[in-house]
Amino acid sequence: MANIYYNWIKLERIETPLAGSFIIRPRVFEDERGIFCETFKDDKFKEFSGIDRPFVQDNQSASTYGVLRGLHFQRGEMSQSKLVRAVVGEVLDVIVDIRRDSPTFGQSFSVRLSDKNHLQLYVPRGFAHGFVTLSPRSVFAYKCDNYYDKSSEGGIIYNDPELALDWELDASELIISEKDLLLPKFQDASL
């Protein structure tokens, strides 16, 4: 765990078990009016993370309880790193390392992201990513360091037995798009 101070803002970096991925805990100021926290500043992020690729696209989704989106990725030169967070509500965020040359290939990690804990997860290129909404409603935001490219998209079915992911909800509670229900198993996915 590393702490870096920027004037009055303290960022905490928490390493995950997957190579290259980490959690950011920003300093949150709270009073009777509510809260304030700085969620992103390019120069601070570069110094803090050591990553010098700009984010070029921001995405946001709104979901209801049980909506599962994923597991998604982009291949090749269009692969994307993401910085993700829950703006409203709570989600279980899940990542899988799909980099064949990685020491953590095929391994997964999950973390609860919420508007209460303000955590952000950095997802490197070469990871499959998905999340499920655990609260009545969620608004999920992610910054991407590459543009979306339909011809480069890929995915892995959420309930792949080899990955054995725990989505923390019963299968009967999940709401999944038809497209995501047709995704291949990990061993059959074109990584």
Image (cartoon, rainbow, N blue to C red):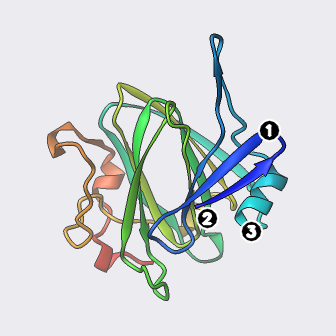
- Label 3 to label 1: alpha-carbon separation: 21 Å
Where does label 2 land, which residue?
Answer: 80
Look at the numbered discs 3 and 1 and tell me whether their residues touch, using CB distance below 8 Å: no
Question: Whole-percent x and y of residue 69?
Answer: 39, 48
Look at the numbered discs 1 and 2 and tell me whether their residues touch, using CB distance below 8 Å: no
Q: Residue at x 72, y 37 (%)?
A: 38
Crowd class of label 3 (few under 14; some 14 to 19; many from 20; radius 10 Å): few
Identity of the residue furthest to the top in this view: 32
Three-letter amino acid code of the residue under disc 3: Gly
Q: Is residue 119 left or right of residue 69?
A: right
- Label 1 to label 2: alpha-carbon separation: 31 Å
Whether residue 36 is situated above or below residue 179 in the rendered picture: above
Q: Nearer the viewer, residue 152 or 5?
A: 5
Where does label 3 land, which residue?
Answer: 50
Q: How many marks?
A: 3
The image quarter containing residue 154 is bottom left
Whether residue 183 is situated above or below residue 38 in the rendered picture: below
Three-letter amino acid code of the residue under disc 2: Gln
Dot placed on the residue nearer the N-terminal end, 3 or 1: 1
Crowd class of label 1 (few under 14; some 14 to 19; many from 20; radius 10 Å): few
Q: Residue at x 44, y 76 (%)?
A: 98
Three-letter amino acid code of the residue under disc 1: Trp
Dot placed on the residue nearer the N-terminal end, 2 or 3: 3
Where does label 1 land, which residue?
Answer: 8
- Per the image, label 1 sits on a secondary structure element best described as loop
